[in-house]
Image (cartoon, helix red, strand yellow):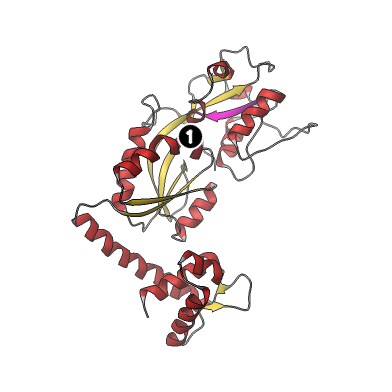
Amino acid sequence: MTIIQFEYIIAVDNFRHFGKAAEACFVTQPTLSMQVQKLEDQLGVLIFDRSKQPVVPTDIGRRIIAQARLVVGESKRVQEIIAEEKGEVAGELSIGIIPTLSPYLLPLFIHNFTERYPKVKVTVYELITEEVVRRLKNEVLDIGIIVTPYEDPGIISKTMFYEEFFAYVSHRSKLFEKETLVADDIGEDDIWLLNEGHCMREQVINLCKNYKDRQTQFKYESGSLEALKKIVDMHGGMTMLPELATLDLAPSKKQFLKRFKEPRPVREVSLVMHRSYLKRKLVEVLHKEILAAIPDYINIQKNKEVIKWK
């Protein structure tokens, strides 16, 4: 048995496909398949049921893979200990970030982070929350940047900041003339929402107690806040924006932003990791760089009403 063989069976379990697993491990499929077969022969058991598509682990295979994850994790921890002893911040860092944060938060910190830590190779994936968590558990990702609280015993979080919600209201809306809004105002006009699966959709619905899914001539849902803003501009109604998504609004568009009365609703943004996460030094410096990059007026302390999404 070798650590390489363990890495291969973990990859097959993650992707449930030998070809994709081989690609992720930067080897040919015959090489990966041969090593998995060799490990099965050594152990005298089948780790994967190849008769099913996608391939799935056998009962004993699941137990072997779980143990393999522990072994591979501990081997990587040895490398991390050596790097810490040398005072190095180096290695590979894979980050999953949700779409309502990615285009607004990432540009604030990623350039400075890569400049300051040139020995860190960063890969970022834009994913919805559930996919971020799934990949963290499968150890495909090192870190997630999502909206919390997120209730899962296998996931731990490190809170970064609290981001205020704003309403983006069309000039044709009856809400446009209001100075500030209350939660009950949402739902009095057409409200454009993100697709199912986006945590912010659930937060908006939780905030708006009188929200009802209206049957209208034109219905549109999107995975992009920018698309929803354009729909408001062209079609009317309103949508909700987190604070970072308002920073680069043109001056002529600022008039469409409406704040809420106290207590103003906010969302909690955190780094999340698998409970047995490695790369602790990288997590620490990433947390520090993000906090240094966000505008001073965005709260890093919980002093407003956090809108939960679950």
Q: Residue at x 48, y 20 (%)?
A: 262
The answer to whether residue 50 is left or right of residue 164 is right
* Residue position marked by numbered label 1 in the rendering: 104
Is 61 one of the magenta-colored residues? no
Amino acid type, mark 1: Tyr
Q: Position of residue 286 (x, y in %)?
A: 34, 44
Residue projecting furthest to the right: 217
Q: Residue at x 44, y 27 (%)?
A: 304
| Quadrant assignment, res 111 | top left
Query: Quick one: quadrant of the C terminus?
Result: top right
Q: Which residue is nearer to you in this view: 255 or 303?
A: 255
- Specify the segment rendered in magenta: 238-242
Note whether 244 is above or below 116 in the view shown.
Answer: above
Q: Position of residue 209 (x, y in %)?
A: 62, 30
Note whether 174 is above or below 238 in the view shown.
Answer: above
The secondary element bearing badge 1 is classed as: helix
Q: Position of residue 221 (x, y in %)?
A: 68, 38
Note whether 89 is above or below 198 in the view shown.
Answer: below
Q: Which residue is nearer to you in this view: 226 or 71?
A: 226
Note whether 98 is above or below 266 in the view shown.
Answer: below
| Quadrant assignment, res 192 | top right
Q: Residue at x 50, y 51 (%)?
A: 132
